Image (tube, grey):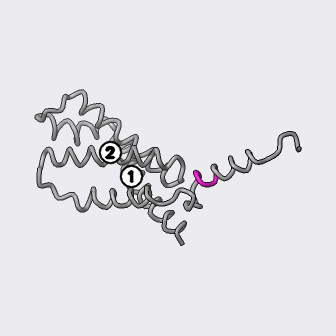
Amino acid sequence: MRAVGILTARVILGLIFGMAGYWKTFELTPIGHAQKLFIVPYANTWIPIWMLWATGTIIPVVEFVAGWMVVLGWRVRECLVALGLILMTVTYGHLLIEPLYNFNGHVIPRTLLLLAVAFMPRDSDWYSLDYWLDRRRREVRNQPVDGH
């Protein structure tokens, strides 16, 4: 059951980020995302405009790629680091504009899912590409060379 629990948490987390990233990348576009959600609200803050453009255009693509990689269970650790950095950035941004921002419906559920996936034993995530690839690598290493 642990493997099913990890799969469920991992897929839900990946879908949340992957679908948001899909929308931001292919419908809103990274430029539109940067303009609407970074430049307009944060132009009068301490954050330099170049940093707003860079962050605003990169986040959608990272969410899209990392989210779908988490769904597949491929390079999950690296993806969780990237998604965690996005969550920290989003949290800071919301709190910069509105210090008492209620992020219970956005940041907290994603963070809890991310932590649940991060703290689960990697060798219990049986339904992931990481598990399958690690298992395959171990099998190849243990095979005798030239049939000996």
Q: Quadrant of residue 106?
A: bottom left
Magenta region: which residues? Answer: 129-133
The image shows residue 59 at horizontal and vertical percentages of 34, 40
Magenta-highlighted stretch: main secondary structure? helix
- Circles 2 and 1, Cβ within 8 Å, touching? The answer is yes
Q: Nearer the viewer, residue 3 or 94?
A: 3
Percent across and percent down for residue 52 are 24, 33
Residue that appears at 53% across and 53% down: 73
Where in the figure is residue 43, as x and y percent of width and height? 14, 34
Decide which of tag 2 and tag 1 comes sooner along the chain: 1
115 magenta-colored: no
Which quadrant does the C terminus fall into? Answer: top right
Q: Which residue is mark 1?
A: 17
Residue, disc 2: 86
Query: Mark 2: which secondary structure?
Result: helix
Q: Viewed as shown, does residue 45 lie left or right of 22?
A: left
